[in-house]
Amino acid sequence: MNKIKIVTDSSSDIPADLAEKFDIELIPLYVGYGHEMYKDNIQVDHDAIFKALLDGKKVNTAAPSPGDFYKVFEKILKDDKATCIICITLSSRLSGSYNSAITARKMLPYSDIRIIDSKTSTLSLGLIPIQAAMAVKKGHSLEETLELIETLIGLNRFLAVLGSFEYVFKGGRAAFFGNIFSKAFLLTPVLTIGRSGKVNLKKFSLNQDKALNYIADNALSIAKEYKRVNVGLFYGKDSEPIKEVKRLFESSKDISIDLLIENKITTVISAHTGPEIWGIAVSPVIV
């Protein structure tokens, strides 16, 4: 009988208690400033990253190395006696995490390790390994679990509001916004991640409240199509603005919510967005 283990990276924003509950292995990315790099959410906290950004320091991020993935894969195969590992990473258009995992797999050529590019980020990514782990616990086969993951990659939706484009520009994650540079600092941007795994501008709103209303309405419309959903709410420094979005979802009579996660966005993503970010991920329940 196959023993399948689910692995993802820390950009998934899966809270530690849920990772433990669903037996998901989290591999940390790196974030740092000056000459030091730290393990995401383990050796550094959000306050330190936000302070560095506000102080004008250059904050750097890095994917886990192939060696990081190799150590985790080897441990799972030897200690957990897994017969197959499914590793779901941050979008390859945003990080080298996927490529590092591919390299690590080549170092274990006789093992069954599946590396999957989620083409998304934060809880839009996190809700995929959670549901995959649920499927494994319910006895779904490897093929069924892989099919589930590919379906969720196609259906998961992500919307986010940024208080400022400043840190996105500095981090080089939105170079194509150069043509709308002047607008970017006057209006409130709403972002999404496209099917290719790149960050895209969804629209500009006149202010933060209108932007939050927009993502709430759109995400709720998507959830109504799916009927039964898992929802992820994420934020930077201040959780208050996302609470109205949460209220709208919890009060809706047109959807059924199996799982709702509310979590501070990982320090690695924070380094590129700055402290003012609020977002929502919607994922259909298939298991």
Image (spheres, rainbow, N blue to C red):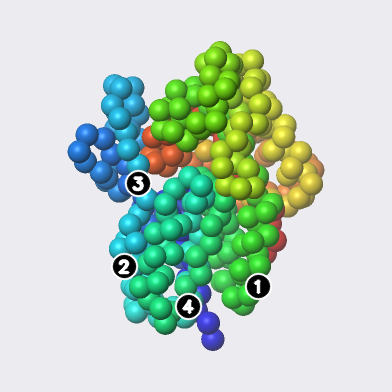
The location of residue 46, given as percent across then percent down, is: 35, 35
Quadrant where the N terminus is found in the figure:
bottom right
Find out whether the residues at labels 2 and 4 contact each other: C-beta distance under 8 Å: no
- Mark 2 lies on residue: 71
Question: Which mark, residue 62?
Answer: 3
Is residue 64 in sight in this rendering? Answer: yes
The mark closer to the camera, 3 or 2, is: 3
Q: Is residue 71 left or right of residue 88?
A: left
Does dot 4 land on a helix, a strand or a loop?
loop
Does dot 1 land on a helix, a strand or a loop?
helix
Tell me the kind of residue under disc 1: Glu
Tell me the kind of residue under disc 3: Ala
Quadrant where the C terminus is found in the figure:
bottom right
Find out whether the residues at labels 4 and 1 contact each other: C-beta distance under 8 Å: no
Tell me the kind of residue under disc 4: Asp
Q: Earlier in the sequence, mark 1 or mark 2?
A: 2
Q: CA distance from mark 1 to mark 2?
A: 27 Å
For the point 26% across and 35% down, the residue is 33
- Mark 1 lies on residue: 144
Does dot 3 land on a helix, a strand or a loop?
strand
Q: Is residue 167 above or below residue 64?
A: above
The location of residue 130, given as percent across then percent down, is: 55, 59
Q: CA distance from mark 3 to mark 2?
A: 17 Å
Q: CA distance from mark 3 to mark 1?
A: 32 Å
- Mark 4 lies on residue: 112
Q: Is residue 187 left or right of residue 65?
A: right
